[in-house]
Every structure is written in structure tokens, then in C-alpha cells.
Amino acid sequence: MNPPNILFLFSDQQRWDTLGCYNPAMDFTPNLDQLAADGARFANAFTCQPVCGPARACLQTGLYATQTGCYRNGIALRPTAPTLADHLHQSGYETAYIGKWHLSCTGDKPVPPALRAGYRDHWLAADTLEFTSTGLEGGFMFDAQNNRVDFGGYRVDKQTDFVLDYLNNRESGRPFFLFVSWLEPHHQNAAGHYQGPPGSKERYRDYPVPEDLRALGGGDWAREFPDYLGCCASLDANVGRIVQALKDLGEYENTLIVYTSDHGSHFKTRNGEYKRACHDACTHIPLIVRGPGFAHGQVIDKPVSLIDLPVTLLRAAGIAIPPAWQGSPLQRLTTSDSERLAASSAWPPDVFIQISESQVGRALRTDKWKYSVRAPGRSGWLHSVAKVYREDFLYDLENDPHELHNLVSDAAYAHVRAELRQRLIERMAQAGERVPVILGRGRYSFLRKS
């Protein structure tokens, strides 16, 4: 069988519970729900870095953010870093990128070829699409020759038009690797609002608000959540357009499709903006994989990470995984029953998360626990690592799924913190960090925001 095409569909700032297949109350995502029914849905998928640029660097390199050097926004990916697109190109794939890039620090200027991380065959992107366009009125990106390409209308729809143009007009005959990076449902920075399609405030005003937002209060969810859902519904409709195009072209069955996001949104309930925290609202993401090796209608409960996706794509393409790359191929959880049983028993029981900008932070997420630490006196903008961290949060997710009661100073959980502390140190070392000291905390109030 020929190597599969690979289509990576990437939203920005999308919570996991905005898809019907995760949350039946959200009945406006029929295309993604069908994709999940046809493939594998990962119920416990998490980002490895809840900030846009660092998460993207991890996906392109197979390394944690501190290993790439892109530990925060505003740091360009090193041109010499071997990337996912490099490996696929060397194995005969046509490599293409459409949408938001955020890894070159070129702002509203074109991204030069040396800073495109190996995407050689088709390019239509803006480094900071949130500043070269708006959700409602369009804007501009740049093509492979650095020509400005203007577009009007609702941004998700127009970006998808460009995707369909690529799929319908490619002529190489080689398998393709196409990375589609939408900006939605990310807020429009300059406007300070989420920009759903016209009518979103009325259409989605009665949908249930996640319990963590209601319980915490504050934030801007009361005003912004309907438009946020409108963005998510628009993404779903455009996924449907792309899937139909693949079917019309006869490419659907031999295309591996991944749908996920870089992080979620806590709507300013945990800190002064939407992410950069350990809480599930901004770390728990949707992840659907459909295609060769995943077409089983499975729901996988094991904790998985964005860092698992680069090695998953290489395995799907039959490419040897570089020894330095982090993560584990998700195929280990979706193969035959006997193989899956063996892989599940050896699968890591937790996800490791690095947090920057708001803090120099690290977190561990298991089925039952959320454990987070931050470095006292260290700037999350100026520093990527620290020698000393202090315990910040501990949540019992089985009994407190909305992360409202911080147990970090409760003496009854000292043994839990000790076990998680040791495991977090191990995960930090696996990510190439030096072994730190993690200190405990004094008294700490419940319902504290980060």
C-alpha cells in the first residue's frame, strides 16, 4: 500500500468540551463527531505547553519547548532544527502549510524559506495571522514567493477555500503532508473578543456553559462564550468541506487526518487572560485521528499529549523515529487487541506539561491528580527553567473535576504530593531538564485562582 497522505487540522485555543463527541450538549459539530466515529477519539489528550508558539514548536520538532529554545512566544524556531516536514520531505512527501505560523518572529512580514521548518512545496501563511487579519473581515497572508495574498469574508471559510484550492490543483502524484493552521476559536487580539460568524451571540446563547467557568465566576465567558462556540461550529463546517473534497478526489481512505488544538481557554477565570495555566480548561484539548491504523471507532482513555503526535505521523509514514524525539506513537494504543493490551500496560500514566510566560511552571496530569509547581522569583518571559520550584496546585480530579479545591497544603495529601513530586522530577529529566529542587507550600486557601 502506498504511504498515506497526512492532513493535520489544527485549531487554536479550543477546549475539548466544545465537540459533541466529547460533550453531547454541543450538537453543532456533526462532521468532527463523524470523524471520531470513523477513527479514534482520545478522551484525555493534553497540550505539552499551553502557549501558542511553544506548542507549535513542539509539533514541528518532536521536542519539548525547552529543548527547541521556543519556550515562549516571540522566539523563532532555529533554522537548523530537524523537523517533521524535513523527515517527510526526505521520504518523498509533498509538504504544504496553510494558515497561522507563529514561529518566525516576522510579524506582518513574509516568513522567509529558511524559517518555514521544511515546508517546501506549498506555502500560504502569516506568522501572526491574528495581526494580519480579523475573523469577520479577512486580511492577508503570504505565498511561497513572499507575495501578499489578500482575502475577504469570514476567516475560517476563506482559509478553507485555500485548502480546497491546494487539494484540487496539486499535480505531483506524491503523497502529501498538509498542515492546516486555523486561528479560530482564538480571540481577536486587537478587538479583545472572540469573533464568531454573524449571529453567533443569538444562536449559541443558550448552550450550557462549562461548570468550571460558572463555579469560578469572573472572567469574560458570559459575554464571549456564544461567539466562541460560533467559531467552533464554523471549524466543524469547514472540516466537513475538506472531508468531502478528499472523498471527491478519491483520497479519503488513504489519508490520515488529525484534528486537535494547541491549548484551550479558561476565559480569564484562572489568570488575566485565556491560557498559561495548569488547569484542564486550557490544557485539555480535542484529539481525533482517522485513517490507516486508526479507523476503528475507538475511544482511547489513556492520557496522551501533543508531543506524541510528531512520532505518530512518522510511524504512519513508515519513517524511523529520531532517537532524540519525545513522545510515543499513538498507534500503540489503536492496534490489534493483544498489541494494544501490551502497549497500554507500558503507556506512561501521566502527561508532562511545561508552562511559560505567566510563570516558569511544570505540571503533571494523571487520571486522578493534577500537580503543578512554579519557580519563585523567576520570570516566565525571561527564564525557561529553574533550579528551585515550589508546589502550587494539587487537585483530586476524581472528586473535583472542575479543579476548585486546591489541596497543595493539606497535610492529608502529603504522601500524594511526595509521589507526584518524584514523578514530575523524572519527567523533567526525561525532557532534558536538570534535576530541580521542589519545595512544599505553607497554608493555602481553597478556590484560589492562579
Image (cartoon, rainbow, N blue to C red):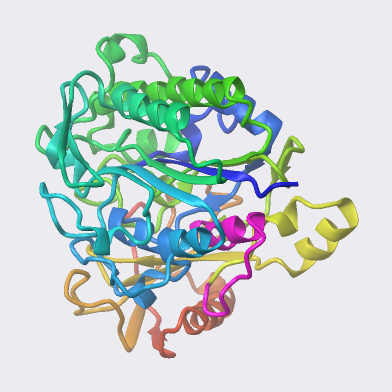
- Identity of the residue drawn at 34% across and 37% down: 182
Image location (x, y in percent) of residue 405: 44, 54
Q: Establish if 263 lies above or below 76.
A: above
Q: Report the front residue among 270 and 293.
A: 293
Q: Report the front residue among 400 and 260.
A: 260
Determine whether, in the image, residue 168 is placed left or right of residue 225: right
- Identity of the residue drawn at 49% across and 85% down: 429
Q: Establish if 209 lies above or below 197.
A: below
Q: Report the front residue among 127 and 91.
A: 91
Determine whether, in the image, residue 120 is placed left or right of residue 333: left
Image location (x, y in percent) of residue 29: 51, 22
- Identity of the residue drawn at 59% across and 78% down: 419
User: How many labels sit on residues?
Assistant: 0
Q: Report the front residue among 322 and 414.
A: 322
Which quadrant: the C terminus? bottom left
Image location (x, y in percent) of residue 107: 12, 51
Give yes or no for residue 306 being in the magenta stretch: yes
Residue 354 quadrant = bottom left
| Observer able to see residue 449 | no
Give yes or no for residue 44 being in the magenta stretch: no
Determine whether, in the image, residue 220 is placed left or right of residue 93: left
Q: Establish if 324 lies above or below 318.
A: below
Residue 166 quadrant = top left
Q: Which residues are magenta?
A: 305-325
Image location (x, y in percent) of residue 86: 45, 64
| Observer able to see residue 14 | yes
